[in-house]
Image (cartoon, rainbow, N blue to C red):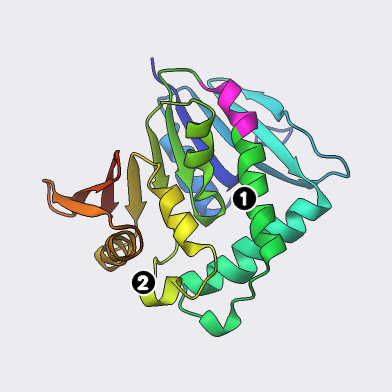
């Protein structure tokens, strides 16, 4: 039976009493596991002095948790840096607040690479992988480079901006190429979907293929085909 493997920046691990930790995205994702065996992978919320290549595993019956610590450098460059000081403001059309650093961008890519190398050995051939939010745009590309052929979906929980806005962010073209490694991309609104389609077409030459049902579009980029869905 296929497992559901969810990747998110934070993981809602039950406390010692078995009580679930509350949180908007965490609560929503926990519901997805009902009736399924699964693995929930992501940042532990902790910062460790030394980098680790293996996650800490927590057993929760049919649901396993795999937790990765960040180093102080990882948190500064990946989390506080590129993800939240550069990418988040740009995605919200707050270009004037975006603070890009090449070192932060390198750190963002590095953590995605590290997480992919930790996650890949935990997956099974029949698993469905579901990645969440802007912290992990490059993750599927990293997993594909490691030989993972599983279906991998991505949901973007914040707006996707128009091409002229995203283009103000250095590295945005690389991120667009990375997101095309997912089989399925979900965004919040049809406007977001249209913006992402335009980004992919104008920056990378991706072609749109009409695909039923309504609000879904198949897109091709080189030899890759992926589906874009608005909720």
Check the image and report above or below for 12 versus 3: below
Q: In the image, which disc is placed on residue 48?
A: none
Q: In the image, which disc is placed on residue 109?
A: 1
| Quarter of the rendering containing residue 61 | top right
Residue 137 at what x, y percent from top left?
A: 50, 51
**Location of mark 2 (residue):** 163
Residue, far right: 49
Report the side of 221 relative to 67 (left or right).
Answer: left
* Residue stretch in magenta: 117-123
Q: Is residue 12 visible?
A: no
What residue is drawn where x is 46% and y is 78%? 93
Magenta stretch encompasses residue 122: yes
Q: Secondary structure at mark 1?
A: helix
The secondary structure making up most of the magenta span is: helix
Check the image and report above or below for 119 versus 208: above
What residue is drawn where x is 42% and y is 37%? 32
Q: Earlier in the sequence, mark 2 or mark 1?
A: 1
Residue nearest the observer in this picture, 156 or 171: 171
Report the side of 198 relative to 154 (left or right).
Answer: left
- Count numbered badges in the picture: 2
């Amino acid at each position: 039976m296929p497992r559901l493997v969810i990747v998110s920046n934070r993981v809602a691990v039950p406390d010692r009493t078995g009580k679930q930790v509350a949180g908007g995205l965490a609560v929503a994702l926990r519901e997805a596991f009902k009736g399924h065996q699964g693995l929930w992978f992501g940042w532990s919320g902790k910062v460790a002095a030394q980098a680790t290549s293996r996650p800490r595993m927590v057993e929760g019956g049919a649901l396993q948790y795999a937790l990765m610590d960040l180093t102080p450098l990882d948190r500064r460059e990946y989390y506080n840096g590129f993800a939240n000081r550069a990418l988040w403001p740009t995605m919200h059309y707050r270009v004037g607040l975006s603070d890009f650093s090449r070192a932060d961008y390198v750190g963002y890519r590095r953590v995605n690479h590290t997480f992919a190398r930790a996650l890949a050995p935990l997956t099974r051939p029949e698993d469905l992988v579901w990645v969440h939010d802007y912290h992990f745009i490059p993750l599927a590309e990293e997993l594909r480079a490691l030989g993972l052929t599983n279906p991998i979906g991505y949901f973007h929980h914040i707006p996707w901006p128009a091409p002229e806005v995203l283009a103000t962010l250095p590295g945005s073209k690389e991120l667009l190429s990375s997101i095309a490694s997912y089989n399925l991309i979900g965004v919040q609104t049809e406007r977001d979907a249209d913006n992402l389609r335009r980004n992919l077409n104008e920056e990378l030459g991706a072609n749109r293929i009409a695909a039923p049902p309504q609000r879904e579009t198949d897109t091709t980029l080189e030899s890759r085909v992926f589906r874009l869905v608005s909720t």
